[in-house]
Image (cartoon, rainbow, N blue to C red):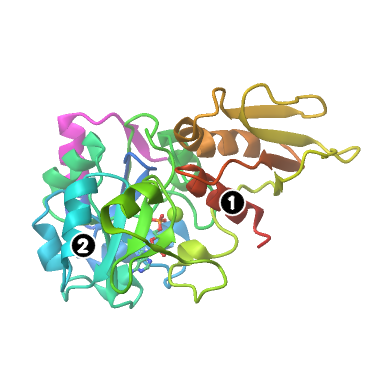
Amino acid sequence: MVRVLKPTEEVLREAASLLRKGGLVAFPTETVYGLGGDALNPEAVAKIFEAKERPYFDPLIVHIAKFEDIERLCSRVDDRARLLMSRFWPGPLTLVLPKGDIVPDIVTAGLRTVAIRMPSHPVALALLREFGGPIAAPSANRFGFLSPTQAEHVKDQLGDRIDLIIDGGPCPIGVESTILDLSEEPTLLRPGGLPLEEIERVIGKVKILTLSDRPRSPGQLKRHYSPRTPLRIIRGESFVIPIGVKAGLLAFKGSPRREGFYVVEVLSPSGDLREAACNLFRSLHRLDSAGLDVIYAEAVPEVGLGRAIMDRLRKAEGLE
Ligand code: AMP
Ligand code: MG
């Protein structure tokens, strides 16, 4: 079984050395745990796909710690991109930009664009600096399943397949980054940890890609980010648990009705969407391991981080 170690200087040195040898290291970011490999080493990147059982058509996000790195990873960086980078990096915003030649095709699944992000988590930044180059890192879970927001989630899903897990505690944001495509008209590919409203305040109206549009990002697969237990979103007030069904409730706020539910998780007692997003995957992991027949999830308002929450719940439901 893989070692799970706290991020001491010695551990970070060892992690960087594993990455240099083409190994895989899971590490915390402010969004979720990432499964990192040397972004410029195609064999290391291939191992990421194998460990996650991720299809090769699903491109990876490249993580950097230095603004200069963007120049060699991308062939064109326009003013909008620079503005967003200066405003929101380091942080939970991934930018999709025209790819530079040094980025291996396996990283971008053959696309002519590359997704790049500078994380703000001190452990992620320390690892990137110690390694000294870009790290390709998708979320450290098996493909299609719940994203990990704690080291033990990574261990449960990938513990027998990777070289090291750096345990930096729970992820402070808890949902994946917001992905914005700037290779054409600014387009939101995935709502995430940075609210759309904040981006629009800086660059104006952003197009929102919906499921009926041509999929540009496999994060838009209908079923994704899923627990093993079936999940249903509760949309109306008049809702009845079917007889004989062992049901769990993912409640948004306050004191939800508990009768009839085998287990209840409350995302945010005060109804704060940031807190709710932060607790989303941890609560789903808990409900998923409670031996339930079904998880019912309350809908949340679709503003700010509520957009990311509803996106993940819809994909967990897999109906649309
Ligand atoms: P993950 O790191 O597991 O959250 O997944 C990364 C997400 O970024 C996936 O949904 C990818 O589809 C998306 N992504 C990565 N590179 C690109 C790209 N070049 N164009 C569009 N989406 C991308
Ligand atoms: Mg993922």
Circle nearer the N terminus (2, 1): 2
Mark 1 lies on residue: 226
Q: Is residue 188 left or right of residue 132?
A: right
Q: Amino acid at mark 1?
A: Ser
Q: Residue at x 20, y 29 (%)?
A: 8
Magenta segment, which residues?
A: 1-17
Asked if the stretch drawn in magenta spans residue 300, the answer is no
Count of marks, rendered view? 2
Give residue 293's quadrant in the image.
Answer: top right
Q: Is residue 82 left or right of residue 276?
A: left
Beta carbon of the mark 2 residue lies under 8 A of ligand 1: no
Q: Residue at x 24, y 40 (%)?
A: 120
Mark 2 lies on residue: 80
In this rendering, is residue 306 above or below 68?
above
Image region (quadrant) for ligand 1: bottom left
Residue 245 numbered tag: none
For the question of whether residue 45 can be seen, the reply is yes
For the question of whether residue 89 can be seen, the reply is no
Residue sitting nearer the eye, 171 or 49: 171
Q: Is residue 143 left or right of residue 250?
A: left
Asked if the stretch drawn in magenta spans residue 7, the answer is yes
Q: Secondary structure at mark 2?
A: helix
Residue sitting nearer the eye, 19 or 256: 256
Q: Secondary structure at mark 1?
A: loop
The image shows residue 230 at horizontal and vertical percentages of 70, 49
> Closer to the camera: disc 2 or disc 1?
2
Q: Residue at x 12, y 59 (%)?
A: 69
Give residue 320's quadrant in the image.
Answer: bottom right
In this rendering, is residue 292 above or below 79?
above
The image shows residue 246 at horizontal and vertical percentages of 80, 36
